[in-house]
Amino acid sequence: MAERELVERLERIERLLREVRESLEHLEGLLREAGLEASLALSIALGLSRPVLEALEAARRVAPLLEVLDADEVTRSILVVLALCEPLSISEVYRRVRRLRGRASRSTIASRLRVLEERGVVVNLGSGRRPRYTLRTCLGGGEA
């Protein structure tokens, strides 16, 4: 009886391992298709603790912006953070950029956000006193 239970458990483990392998192969295929977006997706997934598929979507959203904008590393990080399409306050952007980069100045981030808003890349969904920023592309407004 104990031997039969052991065999059944091993068979279940083998099935689960096959499913995990298939899932990993699927994810690898998605990453190959994403090309340059894969490194962005990895940064988002690891740095911001996001599911891989959500990170891939954010990377696809922000990659075209990064290609056309001559952006410094702080601005690039801000765009990556906003690519998750969550309206964020300056403080929230600051915290997430720090998680990605390890360091950042809140005043620098506020300044970069104002420039990006002036350029039409980000929009303020809040008010002047309590801004909440997101990418324009997240609103369905097309590429900036």
Image: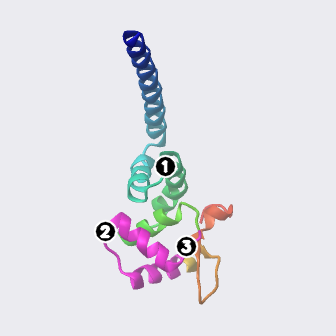
Q: Is residue 71 visible?
A: no
Q: Mark 3 is on which residue type?
A: Leu
* Secondary structure at numbered mark 2: loop
Q: In whole angstroms, how far apart are the C-alphas of marks 1 and 3? A: 19 Å
- Closest to the observer, 86 or 121: 86
The quarter of the image holding the N terminus is top left
Q: For residue 114: magenta? A: yes
Give the quarter of the figure containing the C terminus: bottom right
1 and 2 marks in contact (CB < 8 Å):
no
Residue 102 disc label: 2
For marks 1 and 3 on the same chain, the one whose residue lies earlier in the sequence:
1
Q: Residue furthest left?
A: 102
What range is drawn magenta here? Answer: 87-116
Point out residue 65 in the picture as x, y percentages from the top left corner.
51, 61
Dominant secondary-structure state across the stretch colored magenta = helix
Give the x, y percent position of residue 73.
Answer: 36, 68
Compared with residue 57, is residue 94 higher up or lower down, i.e. above or below?
below
Question: Which mark identifies residue 51?
Answer: 1
Looking at the rendered structure, the kind of residue marked 2 is Gly
Identify whether 26 is placed above or below 67. Answer: above
Q: Can you tell which quarter of the image residue 18 is in?
A: top left
Residue type marked 1: Pro
Side of 74 where 63 appears, left or right: right
